[in-house]
Amino acid sequence: MTRVLYDLCGIDEELRFSPYCWRVRYALAHKGLEVETRPWRFTEKQALAFADHDKVPVLVDGDTVVVESYEILRYLDRTYPEAPLLGEGLAETRGHFFKHYTERSLAPAMMRTIIMDLLNAIHPDDRAYFRETREKRFGRALEEFHSPAKGLAQLDAALEPLRGQLKNADFLDGEAPAGADYLVFGSFMWARCVSSADLVSNADPVHAWIERMLDQHGGLGRQALRITDIEGAYR
């Protein structure tokens, strides 16, 4: 039975940029599970009606439908216990910390840095929706929210905990990547896919970790389509 992941796409169906979907794609690869990724756009809400949900990722695994990236990782650990992602007890609590850290510290700084690139990477039919919903969330126009200098300064400060861990280990989870790495790296894949902005200095231990993560699972991240690969075709 085919396993299906509904995955956010942009101006090209192969431009997949959701940080939450990237978490799941890496988690599935970690488990050695094959999946068909199905492109989905912001305004295609009806396509997810079967899941009683209005955003991706949505994983369909046989008769089971699971929504929200963190819940999907927990489901994968319960259903396919080999090669754990989050573990149990204190290990899962640690994973939950990295989820909140990424969403509340790293992602807002990245968003402030790349939001106009992100807007241009979104399918034209979705841009009005994206602008309306995000401007309501931010309380200002996207152009006013966009501030690369402030965003990069905010990101640099937010990366300090990662630097501390990555000075002593190759991955956030130790000698090999697992759930914590995927929860954080999804946001770096988001930025990489939609923008050419340099978020991290080449000399930063976080940069070396990003390079290692791009090479994981047969180069899953490195092979992903980027806006820089196709932007000339959509001008």
Image (cartoon, rainbow, N blue to C red):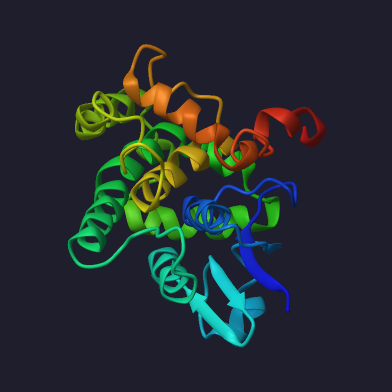
Q: Judge whether 84 appears above or below 19 on screen.
A: below
Residue 47 or residue 180, whichever sits in front: 180
What residue is at 52 percent from the left and 53 percent from the top?
Answer: 30
- Residue 92 percent coordinates (x, y): 26, 62
x and y percentages locating residue 193 in the rendered image: 59, 37
Quadrant housing the N terminus: bottom right
Q: Residue at x 44, y 37 (%)?
A: 143
Q: Position of residue 40 (x, y in %)?
A: 66, 63
Compared across the picture, whether 164 is left or right of 66 comes to left
User: In the rendered view of the protein, which quadrant contains the C terminus?
Assistant: top right
Q: Is residue 229 above or below residue 102?
A: above
How many numbered tags mark residues here? 0
Horizontal side of residue 145 vs 127, given as left or right: left
Q: Quadrant of residue 78?
A: bottom left
Tell me the residue at 38%/37% (across/down): 110
Residue at the far right: name it. Answer: 233
Residue 50 percent location from the top left of the image: 61, 86
- Residue extending furthest toward the front: 82
- Above or below: residue 66 compared with residue 52: above
Give residue 230's quadrant in the image. Answer: top right
